Image: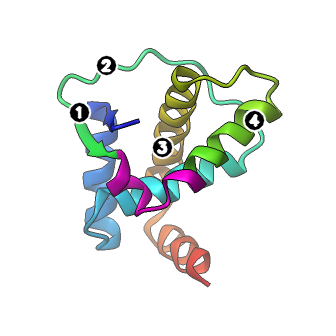
Amino acid sequence: MERIKLSASARNQLATLKRRTGIEHNNAICRHALCMSLANPSVPPEENFSFAGGLEIDWRTFTGGQEALYTNLLVVRLQSEGKRVSEEAIRQTFLLHVHRGLSYLVSRREEDLLQELCAALI
C-alpha cells in the first residue's frame, strides 16, 4: 500500500479524538484504532466506504517505519479468519479495522479514553 484513504466520517472522528486527547497526529490515533479493532476477535461488518471529503495518509507515515509489522498483523488476521491473502484483502481488512477502531475510540467517555490510551503505553 502506498496511501490509505479514510472516509469523511473517520476524518470527523479523528478531529474529535485529537481535540479530546491532545494527540496531534492522525497516524498515531489510527494505529491505536487499528490495534484495538484487531484485538477484538469478531469480524467487522463489510462496508462500502465513500472517500469523498475524507483524508489520505501515507502508508509509511501510518506505520511509523514498521510497514512489515502492520502488514503481518493484517495477514495473520486474514489467515485466522480463513480468508485468502491478497493486496486487496489486506487493504480492505485494514480499512474495516481502522474505521471500527475509530468508532470504538470516539464512543469512549473522555476519562476512559485517556486512561485506556495511557495504559496502552505502559
Distance, label 4 to label 3, CA atoms, is 15 Å
| Labels 4, 3: front one | 4
Q: Position of residue 52 (x, y in %)?
A: 20, 22
Q: How is the image coloured?
A: rainbow
CB atoms of marks 2 and 4 within 8 Å:
no
Q: Which residue is mark 3?
A: 103
The verdict on residue 55 being magenta is no
Q: Are marks 2 and 1 in contact (CB under 8 Å)?
A: yes
Report the residue marked by disc 4.
Answer: 42
Question: Which is more N-terminal, label 4 or label 2?
Answer: 4
The tag earlier along the polypeptide, 4 or 3, is 4
Q: Earlier in the sequence, mark 2 or mark 3?
A: 2
Q: Which residue is mark 2?
A: 50
64 falls in the magenta region: yes
Which residue is drawn at the image coordinates 52% and 36% (left, top)?
94
Mark 2 vs mark 3: in front? 2
Looking at the picture, tell me which residue is in the foreground, 87 or 18. Answer: 87
Residue 117 locus on image (x, y percent): 52, 72
Apparent side of residue 90 relative to residue 11 in the rendered image (left or right): right
